[in-house]
Amino acid sequence: MPSATAVQSTEKHRVARKSTFVSIVLNTVLMALQIVIGVFAHSQALVADGIHSLADLISDFVVLIANRHSGAEPDADHNYGHSRYETVASLFLGALLIAVGVGMLWRAGTRLADLQSIPAVHMSALAVAVLVLISKESLFRYMLREAQRVRSAMLIANAWHARSDAASSLVVALGIIGSLAGVRLLDPIAAAIVGFMVARMGWTFGWDALQDLSDRALDETASADMRALLLATPGVRDVHEMRTRKMGDFALVDAHILVDPLISVSEGHYIAESARLRVLADSRVLDALIHVDPENDAVARPTVNLPNRERVVGEVNAAFAAAGLKPASVNIHYLSTGLNVEVVLAPPDLRTAENDAPSLSRVDLDALRRSLGARKLDVLQEVDALRAESGTSTEAGPGEAIAPAKAAESHGAT
């Protein structure tokens, strides 16, 4: 994991522990007040809100457990780390909230079915409801600020959970006020509304978590940012087949980059590594896999019946050996347009008499090209750099270009 990402992850876990402990303490106090006062004040809405606070308390412990495990380093069983523990925790929270909400709706429905048994609500229930409303709204603002600072989806979800608590407390307060005014059915109606809000919030969290666990991609804006980082890398001509998938609060990026098809493998690898480091500099990315393509393989690919390297090198060596020549290297380019072969000859030995020197004219390049099924066959001649520095000169023949380091003869077959 890159150092910047590791620092961000450490800070996120620290904030998660701190904010969650604050939520645990507050929810424990409020839950006790709501349930105890709700029972004595005959307010079903306040008791329902107390059960909601109990669900919050359970969810806080789930967040703590997920936060602890999601920060673990990659291992043999989890090569990409444990970031999805947070997503699983969000899914669990969603299921818990749905269950709690449905239970509240059921209890409110049975209460409304027997309106005559609804008792009068005591004023103390309103005081507790207002206290809970103020406390939960303050908790929401604190948790959301911290969650956005460290960019944690799980903590943001938990913060909005606190806001839903504040909204439900407002509904409870209104229901209690109505009941105190003589309309007793407003208290169970308020309880039913709270149940619906809780279930709806649980569905939202659970569905989002399920989408992330199903390898949901980054949004269009974030994906465009990743593509722009890749295209800005020197040597990258184009980007295609780019894919992203969520991994907790981070993302994995896979992409194919298009480079010059005639560069070396090491240069292509250098360009790919440069592009990867650019993407990893984005704090949203956990890891990136960059594939190098000489051509856009989504559009064009080399034909499958081209000869492999072993056959090409064997035939080239045999053809040149017949003329007394030995290639220093053979470069092969597999392209959608066909096979290109580049033969590099070692520098000529000046101590060999000119009339005894091996000659490239003895090699039938056209026949070799046809035998290989190549579209193009080029022959390059290396020149000894030490010889050039010592002042020894080699006279270039027709179609030959001599340079201090390398010289390319224009011999070739197309």
Image: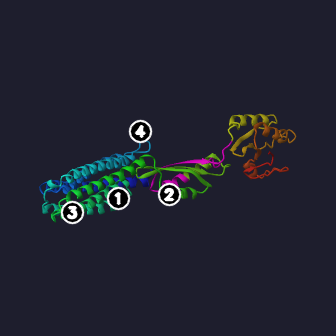
Q: Toward which corner of the image does residue 334 lie, by quadrant?
A: top right
Residue at the (76%, 39%) spot, across then down: 373
Mark 1 highlights which residue?
147
Amino acid beneath label 2: Glu
Q: Secondary structure at mark 1?
A: helix
Circles 4 and 3, Cβ within 8 Å, touching? The answer is no
Mark 2 highlights which residue?
220
Q: Which residues are magenta?
A: 275-302
Picture mark count: 4
Badge nearest the viewer, 4 or 3: 3
What distance separates the C-alpha of mark 3 from that of mark 1? 28 Å
Residue 173: mark in rendering: 3
Q: Is residue 360 above or below residue 222?
A: above
Q: Which badge, 3 or 1, comes first in the chain's sequence?
A: 1
Question: Residue 60 appears at what percent x and percent y?
Answer: 27, 51
Circles 4 and 2, Cβ within 8 Å, touching? The answer is no
What distance separates the C-alpha of mark 2 from that of mark 3? 42 Å
Q: Is residue 333 above or below residue 29?
A: above
Circles 4 and 1, Cβ within 8 Å, touching? The answer is no
Q: Residues within 10 Å of mark 4 (few under 14, many from 20)?
A: few
Mark 4 highlights which residue?
77
Q: Which badge, 4 or 2, comes first in the chain's sequence?
A: 4
Question: Does the magenta-highlighted stretch encompass residue 301?
Answer: yes
